[in-house]
Amino acid sequence: MKEIALIVHEDATLSTITGAMDMLIHTNNLFRLTGKPLPFKIVLAGERESNDLFPVNPAFVSYRPIKDIANADLVIVPAFYGDRDFMLKKHSDIIKCISTLYHGGAEIASLCSGIYFLAEADLLSGRSCTAHWNDMEDIVRRYPDVNFLSDMVITDQEGIYTSGGAFSSLNLILYLIDKFCGREVGVWASKMFSLDMDRIRQSHFAVFKGQRQHKDDDILKAQNYIEENHHLPLSIDDIA
């Protein structure tokens, strides 16, 4: 049985927590119904002593303060709302705990913007990672040592897992179920949650943004002109 700790805090994107939790709960229930040992011990791990963020108490799930999850096998860091700089300062204690847990032997997974917590914990330097495609420019600027793969849905490297944007983060949970429980259970989970297995790209969701860091004023003027007049029948002469 693997102990999986889902980090919870007041600024977390709740869908990334509840989505992951539901998938793990249903997988446990499958094993219970077939008389097999449960694969997962699911723990909500928060900054507070008591669980006042999730008043419900679903089956197979318990709550512990984050300081008491030293034996977790996998720690899942959810996405979050709010200004990046402010949130990273506000939750610096969680970031320190993530670093301590990883160096103590736990694997760490981030869902969507949860990648910022991993980067701040210095777990991504020299590693491949992904997140929401819209975060690419900011992440590359903040953390130039990371290999950010904006088109990927999942990365898996040296006990660090990262996932693409928004609900595509559930593809990482599916990947982990498949990895930890075997392909037969992975296929079952894929069907149960209507998620494509082995989906690797999110690039077709990205909104095109021209590269603007080239410092060429003439090209920048041309880019702006195209974007402002895209509805017109432009010619190369017009742009020039």
Image: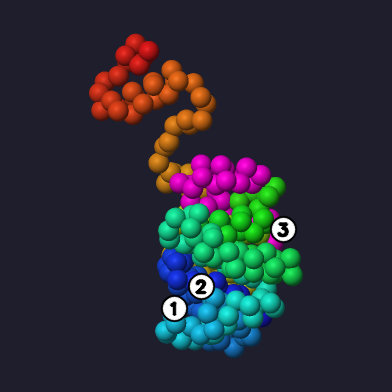
Q: Is residue 31 visible?
A: no
Instruction: Compare marks 1 and 2 and give the one earlier in the sequence.
Output: 2
Camera-nearest residue between 90 and 199: 90
Q: Quadrant of the N terminus?
A: bottom right
Q: Position of residue 145 (x, y in %)?
A: 66, 44
Look at 49% across and 71% down and name the residue there.
9
Judge whether residue 79 is colored magenta. no
Amino acid marked by disc 3: Glu
Viewer-nearest of labels 3 and 2? Answer: 2
Q: Is residue 228 visible?
A: yes
Amino acid marked by disc 1: Leu
Q: CA distance from mark 1 to mark 2?
A: 8 Å
Q: Position of residue 223 (x, y in %)?
A: 39, 25
Vertical relation: 230 (above or below) 113:
above
Q: Which residue is mark 2?
A: 8
Q: Position of residue 54 (x, y in %)?
A: 44, 80
Q: Quadrant of residue 147?
A: top right
Q: Which residues are magenta?
A: 130-159
Look at 47% across and 75% down and name the residue there.
22
Q: Which residue is mark 3?
A: 158
Q: Quadrant of residue 161?
A: bottom right
Instruction: Compare marks 3 and 2 and give the one earlier in the sequence.
Output: 2
Q: Which residue is mark 1?
A: 53
Q: CA distance from mark 3 to mark 2?
A: 24 Å
Q: Quadrant of residue 172?
A: bottom right
Camera-nearest residue between 194 and 82: 82
Confirm or deny contact between disc 1 and disc 2 (CB under 8 A).
Answer: yes
